[in-house]
Image (spheres, helix red, strand yellow):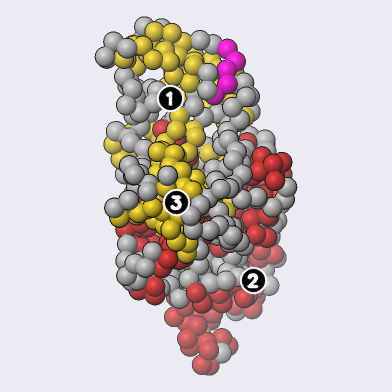
Amino acid sequence: MAVILKISGPVVEAEGLTGAKMFDVVRVADEGLIGEVIRLSGDVASIQVYEDTAGIRPGEKVVNTGTPLSAELAPGLATSIFDGIQRPLQVIQEASGNFIRRGVVTEALDKKKKWKFVPTAKKGERIEEGDILGVVQETPIAEHRILCPVGSFGTLEEISEGEFTIEEPVFTLKLKSGESRDFPMLQRWEVRRPRPYKQKLQPDILLTTGQRVIDAFFPIARGGTACIPGPFGSGKTVAQQQLAKWSDANMIVYVGCGERGNEMTEVLTTFPELEDPRTKRPLMERTILIANTSNMPVAAREASIYTGITIAEYYRDMGLAVALMADSTSRWAEALREISGRLEEMPGEEGYPAYLGRRLAEFYERAGSVITLGSKERFGSVSVIGAVSPPGGDISEPVSQNTLRVTRAFWGLDASLASRRHFPAINWLTSYSLYKDTLKDWYAKNVSPDWIDMQSKAMLILQQEAELQEIVQLVGPDALPERERAVLDSARMIREDFLQQSAYHEVDTFTSFKKDYLMMRVILRFSELEIQAVEAGVPLSKILGLKVRDKIGRMKEIPENASEQELTQILRDMEEQFKEIRA
């Protein structure tokens, strides 16, 4: 029998685990705490325990389950709230009250609930791994497609329509070996092993987020990767929540990894009340939440990222667009650092393990737009957006730098913008997106052929403002020529009337790309007319007094259904008022 030799925080050493393999799940001590083998040396295994180890003693037993940490994948995932190792928090609350009791054992998914299974494949068909065999209406807005498990090929011998639990057989395959095997809807997959696909594609479809600064200036494609680094109070969590609420992905996986309990509580209480802007149904019906707060065991924080990405890949394999929000990967890296220290490994920069960069790359590489497995061509994507919390906002630290190497969109949050109450506090001069070139055709087809030019003009005005600000700080704005003051005015309009966006305003919280385009067109046209008027000798003070400026300042509050009519009217009013002052 295997017994505990040594305990060091969340890391336990056990002797006698003969036949154990790396990443096997074990039950530790008399209470049966859940752990995972992370190092083997002879018959001594180092185990990271996903629960509090206080009070356990050397000599207590350790039992190997013989299986790696795996996620259960089946109908019932949508609307669920799990902890880092896929234990449903509502079920845990019923079993142990408001505080998670050690050693509590729960099923990840309800094994008794029956689901209506509707076959889409026919008896006698040749079936490959990844083929869709039927569908289950998981929620009113989420259709769950039942897939042939990876590694299974054969002829469909039997398939039944009806109501089944996730463990009851719904189809039978005659395998190549001649054996007939029954398959349920439930699949299990090792969380640390990426799910396979046929081919990875270039991401060339925009992931619309409804946030103007992202969609217009620093876009992310479906299947892309982005990081949001920023200091405390700069709005990382609100930005992540906004993306989870409003991005046009089919499914959302939100991983609260090591964040404060009150922030996660806000997510857990607000998400069920949110309305999906496209279906007008509760947003929670296409959302899976994984909550692992900073006061939960550190080892489970490390596992939560893998649990989330495995669930995201499963929905991707159905041919869906999935967005995963990880908040925050810095806390995940801190968990790696703590466990590495307990294992007495050689520390790297700032005490992080030397393999930090590889682990981050492995995680972000699981994002992508792919052709999924299956006999019929199907496309799916997983977009990964990770928040990074560098100490003091210093992005030269290892987690930020290693994340920047593997992500293609960088949304740098600025504490000075946040202190001026400019949200989202994404700094337009330091942020970037490498997806702009791959999205050119998408913009031309779905927005307007001149969108890229408009975007470049707006960014040029903001860069000119940054250069002029150095002079303004020395001599004041009144010392500048009127043309330069007009540039500053145009830049202010872009900043305040376009980039600034309230997450808590009923209308302004989400903006469609159609409205983005019209708003940008209004501001740039005003800027053109303003420069022309100044060059024609019109005093800037006269331009600043135009009535249309008030309408431009309030255009972000125009409802979506009235935006085209009202913004077109603003353009007309603008042209007329400039004609009047130049007359």
User: Residue placed farthest to the bottom in the image?
Assistant: 475
Q: Secondary structure at mark 1?
A: strand
Relative to the observer, which residue lies in front, 187 or 142?
A: 187
When the figure is inspected, residue 489 is found, relative to residue 167, above or below; the finding is below
Q: Residues within 10 Å of mark 1 (few under 14, many from 20)?
A: many
Report x, y in % for residue 422: 61, 69
The disc, 1 or 2, on the residue closer to the chain's N-terminal end is: 1
* Residue 292 image offset from top left, x and y in percent: 57, 54
State which region is magenta. 162-166
> What is the secondary structure assignment of the residue under circle 3?
strand
From the image, give the main secondary structure of the stretch colored magenta: strand
Q: Nearer the viewer, mark 3 or mark 2?
A: 3
- Residue ID at (29%, 33%): 198
Tell me the residue at 49%/15% (across/down). 170
Q: Position of residue 274 (x, y in %)?
A: 68, 44
Decide which of 83, 572 is in the foreground and name it.
Answer: 83
Residue 428 visible at all: no
| Residue 184 colored in magenta in the image | no
Of the two numbered discs 3 and 2 on the same chain, state the one appearing first in sequence. Answer: 3
Q: Is residue 318 in sight in this rendering?
A: yes
Measured in 3D between alpha carbons, the distance from the residue under mark 3 to the one under mark 1, in whole angstroms, is 41 Å
Residue beneath disc 1 = 147
Numbered circle sitting on residue 3: 3
Q: Which mark is residue 421?
A: 2
Q: Looking at the picture, which amino acid does disc 2 mark?
A: Arg
**Which quadrant is the C terminus positioned in?**
bottom right
Q: Which mark is residue 390?
A: none
